Image (spheres, grey):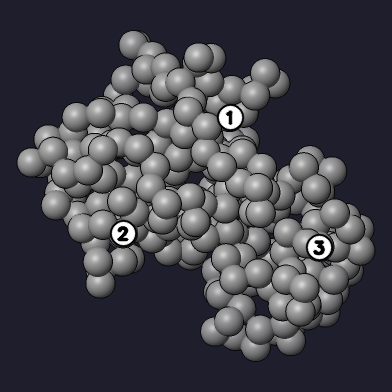
Amino acid sequence: MTLALRIPRVLYDQLRQHGEATYPHECCGVLVGEFDEAGGKAIKAVVLCGNTRTDSPQNRYHISPSELVRIQREALLAGHDIVGFYHSHPDHPAHWSATDLDEAHWTGCSYVITSVEKGRAVLTNSFMLLEQEEAKHFEDEGLDVVEQ
Amino acid sequence: MPKVLIPTPLRPYAGKQSVIEVIAKTVGEALNDLVTQHPDLRKHLFAEDGKLRSFVNVYLNDEDIRYLNKDATPVKETDTVTIVPSVAGGQ
């Protein structure tokens, strides 16, 4: 597997801790960084977001579009991009679900999922969304945690 | 000129640009000018009935156009229209 998504250890820990902090609810946030010419991505910042799915936060997440607008604007001003998103699966495997695929629309971006078991972050996996709506699918993506 | 910010998944259909200037007096005109400049964007923004696809959010500066005057919302020369696909899911 090609190592395609690089994340500094401190940011990796940050997104996993977010899932522990919101347990038993799902956490969510945005990955800001850079695309490289080879198709890989380097994460420069993790932006924690609120989960607006207060009707079912234990198994659903949604990021307010107004937060996305602000994050996208600030990323572009800093010379970066939105390169992906993360969320947690409380007491559920770190693998995308049918709902995750149905609701994924950022082709080319990474969707990072952390399983949180009994309040503790266990596995974190990354999946890249490929193709447009009618043919969209997730592909396993390597997660390269960079020690600093 | 008003600007339209293009999210990463749509840039392949917009000449790889993140910001595109448009000639427009309303949000609807801004989107129309955008797809006139970049026709490949049309099917990614609009459904066959011509309405915005359900997962596409359009903001004028920091306001969702659904809570303004939708397509008829006026835009000024200094305004920014932002396109953001929704982000959601769950186990």
Q: Please, is residue B26 above or below residue B69 in the view? A: above
Q: Helix or strand or loop: what does disc 1 sit on?
A: strand
What is the crowding at mark 2: few (fewer than 14 residues within 10 Å), some, or many (at least 20)? many
Q: Helix or strand or loop: what does disc 2 sit on?
A: loop
Is B39 situated left or right of A26 in this image? right
Q: Please name whichever residue, B78 or B60, is drawn nearer the observer in this view of the structure.
A: B60
The residue where tag 1 is placed is A34
Q: Please, is residue A125 above or below residue A72 in the view? A: above
Q: Please, is residue A62 above or below residue B7 in the view? A: below
Query: What's the mark number on residue A1?
Result: none
Q: Please name whichever residue, A93 or B70, is drawn nearer the observer in this view of the structure.
A: A93
Q: Residue at x 61, y 46 (%)?
A: A136
What is the CA distance from the residue labelled 3 to the residue labelled 2? 30 Å
Please, which chain is the residue tagged with disc 2 on?
A
What is the CA distance from the residue labelled 1 to the residue labelled 2? 28 Å
Which quadrant holds residue B46?
A: bottom right
Q: Please name whichever residue, A137 or A19, is drawn nearer the observer in this view of the structure.
A: A137
Name the spot of residue A8 as percent of width and height, x first: 38, 21
What is the crowding at mark 3: few (fewer than 14 residues within 10 Å), some, or many (at least 20)? some
Quarter holding the C terminus of chain A is top left
* Circle nearer the N terminus (1, 2): 1
The residue where tag 3 is placed is B42
Badge 3 and badge 1 in a common chain: no
What is the CA distance from the residue labelled 3 to the residue labelled 1? 26 Å
Query: What's the mark number on residue A60?
Result: 2
The amino acid at mark 3 is Arg
Q: Residue at x 66, y 54 (%)?
A: A134
Q: Residue at x 26, y 45 (%)?
A: A89
Q: Nearer the viewer, mark 3 or mark 1?
A: 3
Name the spot of residue A116 as percent of width and height, x first: 18, 39
Pick out the residue farthest to the right.
Answer: B36
